[in-house]
Amino acid sequence: MTTAQRPTLEAVARRAGVSRATVSRVVNGSTTVAESIQQAVRRAVEELGYVPNLAARSLVTQRTDSVALVMPEAATRVFSDDQVFPGIIRGAAQELEAADKQLVLMLAGSPAGHERVERYTTGRHVDGVLFASLHGEDPLPGRLARLGIPVVCSGRPLDGAEVPYVDVDHVGGVAEAVRHLIGNGRRRIATIAGPQDMVAGIERLIGYRETVAAAGLPELVAYGDFTRESGTAAMRQLLAADPELDAVFAASDLMAHAALRTLREAGRRVPDDVAVIGFDDIETAAYTEPPLTTVKQPIVELGRAMTRQLLRIAAGETVEQALVLPTELVLRDSA
Amino acid sequence: MTTAQRPTLEAVARRAGVSRATVSRVVNGSTTVAESIQQAVRRAVEELGYVPNLAARSLVTQRTDSVALVMPEAATRVFSDDQVFPGIIRGAAQELEAADKQLVLMLAGSPAGHERVERYTTGRHVDGVLFASLHGEDPLPGRLARLGIPVVCSGRPLDGAEVPYVDVDHVGGVAEAVRHLIGNGRRRIATIAGPQDMVAGIERLIGYRETVAAAGLPELVAYGDFTRESGTAAMRQLLAADPELDAVFAASDLMAHAALRTLREAGRRVPDDVAVIGFDDIETAAYTEPPLTTVKQPIVELGRAMTRQLLRIAAGETVEQALVLPTELVLRDSA
DNA sequence: TTGTACGCGTTATCAC
DNA sequence: GTGATAACGCGTACAA
């Protein structure tokens, strides 16, 4: 390791023949510096390859110019095929780039990891914290918010904490999907629900229940965890429970994909015998057999919206507690 | 924003009735502190909810306990369905968690982003930099390495810089796949190659070329960019160029997936008329029609290995310049 | 074993 | 407009 001593403000100041304070002003874009001096300083900065030390800066400014994105690393799901988390990451990264801030990614899978996240964020080492899709009633968002740390969640916090959040319109999206099925004459509409310790799972099930109930239709529910494997198992259960079912709404495209295959293996034609609708609109949805009709959610936009809210909070503004993004039914061939 | 003043070392010291230095020792796990005092300090820390200020700490220790993972945000591909980048992220996060370091994610899509990455990493604001899949001849890794900043790339740097890297055995994996096709009697084996400004694209094409050449077979190449759309276009080109082709090796599963559909639309049966093999082994590969035979690459392990190498370099050890991870041919129904 | 004192590289508050 | 100088919160020789 070459200990190539990085130049400091001091070094630049000497080189340019001015004081540290002046260099600092130029570096930070103060306008109250004579043009000639600015040029001299800039030249010195260039020649020495000076780069400000962020640690020193944040020590005095009390800002870190970075925000944390916390994801619960629930085994396989976080980076599973459904692109939900990558989409959020991408949206957040885009928005933060525009704000010239860094994205610190934290996976809080293990209890130890969860504690690390708490230590790190509690210690004000980031300007704010983004929570992606919580499991169960995580008390952390509420706790941080109470400590005055800017926090934004994706999805309503399940513990009822008064934390600002952004979410997609699960209920509305599912309702539209189920109404579409009903409109096509389907009468025995089942659902493969998502995990009931996550808002997305809970609300999509609510959307299904409300809509079939409103139409006076019976409900038929099996549970999965958004993955394909769970979708396969759930589809089999449904088929066993009601061999005559004529439609399935799956709470994720992955589960819908698995349902498609399971139905085919069971001798059902899609959509002739059974119509299938998924949720997410992942890229694969256009390539399933048959192509999947699904509820599209604006996942990158979700990441961006969360980040924008967070930045506004960090800037001292107050934001609405809930922001709900619209979904859209994408019609393909499966329903 | 409640300016809930965070307690400092000073505050803890007063509370525990000792000096700052002693508190610092306890916090950092020094053994040279009397047990009774340790307890008193720990209690004070607990009561005040003290958390060390990382900025102050890194200012004096010259370490940041965080490493950057730089990804080229090439439009859609970074977070496309193929899970390559998410896999690397996940592997890196796992390994860093074990080392108690933070993962700073940087997307260097735009030129501006690229420059930000340079500023940030050059300024020694991270203990090391991981580069995921570079496009073209990016000079940044080499430059950072020369500045003495620990750097590890995924894939051999195309500009020939002497930077340590970890990669999967593209050539070997492809060779095995193509030999499998040959062994099954295929004689007109085409390939849908990846982008030729990325190592993965280049080397997979080399693997194909070497193997068909060694068998005295003709080569037939069309280019894509790893995405499904490009796979569709490439497959059409190949079919137009040689309607009699009896096998296709696609440099990514997404392109293979598109090829599957395109072949079916063109009236070819897979694998009867045309055998298809992909590369990646994404989750979807098991769910295509027919299920896709493919070359599996250990992508999460790649992320982990890169990170381990980086940590070793940062710790002052010297590591081998290249580390190549094995691939594996996963046989399903498409070939 | 514990405390004192200094320095890490910035920004911010003053005088000038 | 510019330059001293005092924080910012911590680690660590060095002294006690």
Image: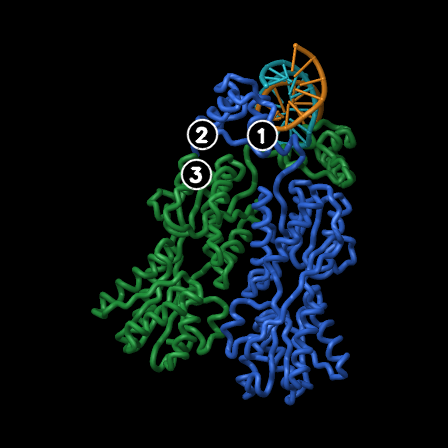
Chain colours: A green, B blue, C cyan, D orange
**In this orientation, does residue B235 appear?**
yes
Judge depth for marks 2 and 1 and give the one in front: 1
Q: Secondary structure at mark 2?
A: loop
| Disc 2: host chain | B
Judge depth for marks 3 and 1 and give the one in front: 1
In x, y percent, where is residue A303?
48, 53
Marking on residue A144: 3
Mark 3 crowd level (few <14, some 14–19, many ≥20, 10 Å Cα): some
Q: Residue at x 75, y 40 (%)?
A: A49
Near-viewer residue (B303 or B36): B36
In the visual, does B305 lie left or right of A146?
A: right
Q: Secondary structure at mark 3?
A: helix
Q: Amino acid at mark 1?
A: Gly
Near-viewer residue (B124 or B281): B281
**Position of the N terminus of chain B by quadrant:** top left
Where is residue B64, by image quadrant?
top right
Q: In the rendered structure, are the residues bearing label 3 and label 1 in contact, judged by CB atoms less than 8 Å apart?
A: no
Q: Amino acid at mark 3?
A: Leu
In x, y percent, where is residue A249?
35, 69
Q: Residue at x 77, y 46 (%)?
A: B146
Q: Residue at x 34, y 61 (%)?
A: A204
Q: Which residue is mark 1?
A: B29
Q: Secondary structure at mark 1?
A: loop
